[in-house]
Image (tube, helix red, strand yellow):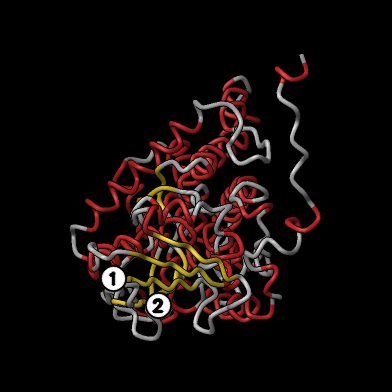
Amino acid sequence: MDTIRHLYRIGHGPSSSHTMAPRFAAEKFFTQFPDAAHYQVTLYGSLAATGKGHFTDQAIYDVLPRQRTIIEWRPDIIPSFHPNGMEFSAYDAEKNPIHQWMVYSVGGGALSEGILDNEVNYCYPHRNLTAILDYLKHTGKSFWEYVEECEGEDIWDYLRDVLHVMYAAIDRGIEKEGVIPGGLGVIRKASLYYRKSKMMNDSYAGNPLLTSYALAVSEENATGGEIVTAPTCGSSGVVPAVIRFVAEMLNRNEEAILRALATAGIFGNVVKHNGSISGAEVGCQGEIGVACSMAAAAAVQLYSGSIRQIEYAAEMALEHNLGMTCDPVNGMVQVPCIERNAFAAGIAHYVAQFVSFSDGSHRVSFDDVVDVMKHTGQDIPSLYRETSQGGLAKVYRMPKKIRNLKQIK
């Protein structure tokens, strides 16, 4: 499996697949052909269908010169390798082609050129969780020790940076108020939930506080703030919220928190390599479902659970998110995405508590659920996989623009 550095990516929202990855691709292409007279970028499938709502064009124009770049939108063409296809073309002054490059945004900000993925850094010897569990049982090691063994001790410096960005997004989000740009009129709620949680007694304050943390990161993501993919931008609020909430509740130190992040990363990585973390490929179960699974594993790690309990929590969290569609209203990561982060955080914490009362025994393995998720995603009609053509995106329409107050007066 690949390094978890490629799972936890630090960047700006609102979408890892539709904003971060296209920007990364544009940067790579521009570095190779900076002196081209003209550029053309053709976006296919889901990238074309919801790219404007995810600021895909802006991400590309931030890199390629706007006056020399044409973006073509082709939602009617869905590449066979992955729905998020991009073709970059460079031309000379006589409009002769210099180079063409087809690349795919495969989820979590990752890029792939197809079968030969040049971004993967294979540092884990085991492909699935069953093999990892067998190794841990044989050696007596924990998940975080396995990460350190495979990644090296410098992984802790990287995860420390990841944690600081996660917490910074929470801190910013719980202070900000106002309407999130985009036209849907979505109001920031994190600050309200956070303030109210501080006015409640301890018996009632827990859920609002956890909710405020998840909303804070998700609202920051929706406005293009700096966040960490966990495993994606659209699901970036779940893991930070749960980890911070549980760590504060148990008064755990930074070392314990980093170990929880590493543990969560293993489960996200297994799904990334055996299933999918792309909403365009398997629906929101691959984003929110996987984030919920990672957060549940992290929480049980913070609760000092056994490796079997941790696997049970991750399996249960993913199992109960199977079949979730990806139908963002108007192609923006706002409705229902922001609230889904909060609900998933609540589920993850409940699962962690549920599992902590058990001995970790269960019937269905994590690998089984990953396999089911992948096939379920393939069976979901394409309009429910980040096209904004079905579900909530179909029944809800943008409200009519209200006249300017000056005009009313």
Q: Measured from the top left, where is residue 147 in percent x and y?
A: 29, 65
Asked whether, in this view, residue 153 is left or right of residue 128, the answer is left
Q: Nearer the viewer, residue 348 or 231?
A: 231
Which residue is depicted at the point 35% across and 58% down?
262
State the residue lying farthest toward the top: 409
Residue 369 appears at what percent x and percent y?
A: 58, 75
Does 82 sit left or right of 135 as displayed? right
Mark 2 or mark 1, whichever is nearer to me: 1
**Please, what secondary structure does the residue beneath circle 1 have?**
loop
Give the amino acid at mark 1.
Asp
Q: Can the viewer see residue 138?
A: no
Quadrant for residue 301, please give it.
bottom left
Residue positioned most to the front: 94
Q: Which image quarter is the C terminus in? A: top right
Q: Quadrant of residue 244?
A: top left
Say above or below: 37 vs 270.
Answer: above
Residue tagged 2: 102
Q: Residue at x 62, y 46 (%)?
A: 334
Q: Identify residue for label 1.
A: 92
Q: Position of residue 327 (x, y in %)?
A: 68, 60
Residue pushed farthest right? Answer: 395
Q: Which of these two is toward me, 68 or 274? A: 68
- Assign the N terminus to one quadrant of the image: bottom left
